[in-house]
Image: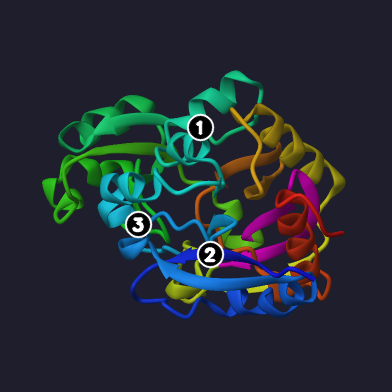
């Protein structure tokens, strides 16, 4: 069997990949595919690489323009560069809303106008996030009356932010993440925030556990992917379940953690999807 070589794009802090990345190495090897881990900061076109797969460049948002410039020449790239660019700015949420996706109500504002914009919404409590961010960096939960104090935004960098009403459901039910490979549903996890917190990320003390979501959450996730501008090798769709139905938090198409450890078949499913993308395998 001719063994093909692919590259998992990581960053300088994860030159050997993440735990999830490593889980798929053996299944890929069984399918005749070897993996090299390449930090995006040093990625260059290489004729020996059959595919470049963005996996764990979890610092990209700190230098997003440099990241996009660096990976742009890499081919074939998964997910595609156009899809990555589209997903890199949270304005994509408005496009999904226009397509009928139930998003959390969202407005956008430059940092210097956040107080006025938040006040105009009439929401009692809001969440503020940078339009380009990851892992909750720069995300704040603020009560509306506090917006009149400039200190509420001390330390926030210049740039554009999204403002959303805070949904208390996240404190009780957390978020549900649905993972897809080549548009096919694979598995889900429920992420819960630590006591007294609202961010569900593990780096903020949150927990992750396998779950079986309501069928409407999977169906809505499929609708989200149909509304995206092009198909991708992988996707993670994050929801908050409310009394009014699921509300989209975000769709992750750049470097999502895929929680392969949450389901025994997930690493093999991802390996199969990669093999199919290369034109062979299961």
Residue 276, image x, y percentages: 78, 52
In this picture, is 228 found above or below 273?
above
Q: Secondary structure at mark 3?
A: helix
Q: Is residue 22 left or right of residue 39?
A: right
Around disc 3, counting alpha carbons within 10 Å, would you say few (fewer than 14), some (14 to 19), or many (20 or more)? many
Q: Position of residue 172 (x, y in %)?
A: 63, 61
Quadrant hosting residue 113: top left
Q: Which residue corresponds to mark 3?
A: 60
Location of mark 2 (residue): 7
Quadrant of the rendering where the C terminus is positioned = bottom right
Earlier in the chain: of badge 1 and badge 2, it is 2
Examine the image and state in which quarter residue 13 appears.
bottom left
Dot 1 corresponds to which residue? 93
Give the magenta-colored segment's residue range.
174-192
Disc 1 is placed on an element classified as helix
Alpha carbon distance from label 2 to label 3: 17 Å
Which of the two residues, 5 or 239, is positioned nearer the viewer here?
A: 5
Mark 1 or mark 2, whichever is nearer to me: 2
**Picture layout, residue 99 above or below residue 75:** above
Residue lying at 71% horizontally and 53% vertically, measured from the top left: 178
Q: Marks 1 and 2, Cα distance to the nearest angstrom?
A: 30 Å
Residue 98 visible in the displayed image:
yes
Q: Is residue 262 left or right of residue 159?
A: right
Q: Is residue 181 magenta?
A: yes
Magenta: predominant secondary structure element?
strand
Residue 219 falls within the magenta-colored stretch: no
For this rendering, which residue is in front, 277 or 262?
277
| Label 1 environment density (alpha carbons within 10 Å; few <14, some 14–19, many ≥20) | many
Helix, strand, or loop for circle 2? strand
């Amino acid at each position: 069997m001719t063994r093909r070589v692919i590259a998992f794009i990581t960053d300088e802090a994860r030159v050997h990949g993440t735990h999830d990345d490593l889980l798929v190495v053996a299944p890929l090897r069984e399918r005749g595919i070897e993996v090299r881990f390449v930090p995006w900061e040093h990625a260059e076109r290489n004729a020996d690489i059959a595919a470049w797969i963005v996996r764990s460049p979890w610092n990209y948002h700190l230098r997003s323009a440099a990241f996009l410039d660096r990976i742009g020449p890499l081919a074939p790239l998964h997910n595609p560069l156009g899809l990555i660019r589209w997903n890199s700015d949270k304005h994509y949420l408005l496009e999904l809303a226009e397509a009928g996706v139930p998003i959390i109500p969202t407005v956008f504002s430059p940092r210097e106008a956040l107080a006025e914009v938040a006040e105009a919404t009439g929401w009692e409590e809001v969440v503020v996030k940078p339009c380009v961010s990851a892992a909750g960096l720069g995300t704040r939960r603020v009560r509306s009356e506090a917006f009149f104090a400039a200190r509420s935004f001390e330390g926030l960098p210049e740039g554009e932010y999204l403002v959303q009403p805070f949904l208390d459901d996240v404190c009780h039910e957390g978020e549900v993440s649905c993972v897809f490979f080549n548009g096919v549903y694979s598995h889900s996890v429920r992420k819960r925030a630590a006591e007294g917190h609202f961010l569900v990320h593990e780096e903020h003390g949150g927990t992750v556990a396998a779950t079986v979501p309501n069928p409407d959450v999977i169906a809505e996730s499929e609708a989200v992917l149909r509304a995206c501008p092009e198909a991708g090798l992988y996707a993670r769709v994050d929801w908050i379940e409310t009394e009014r139905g699921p509300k989209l938090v975000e769709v992750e198409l750049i470097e999502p953690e895929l929680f392969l450890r949450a389901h025994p078949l997930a690493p093999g499913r991802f390996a199969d999807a990669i093999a199919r993308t290369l034109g062979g395998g299961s």
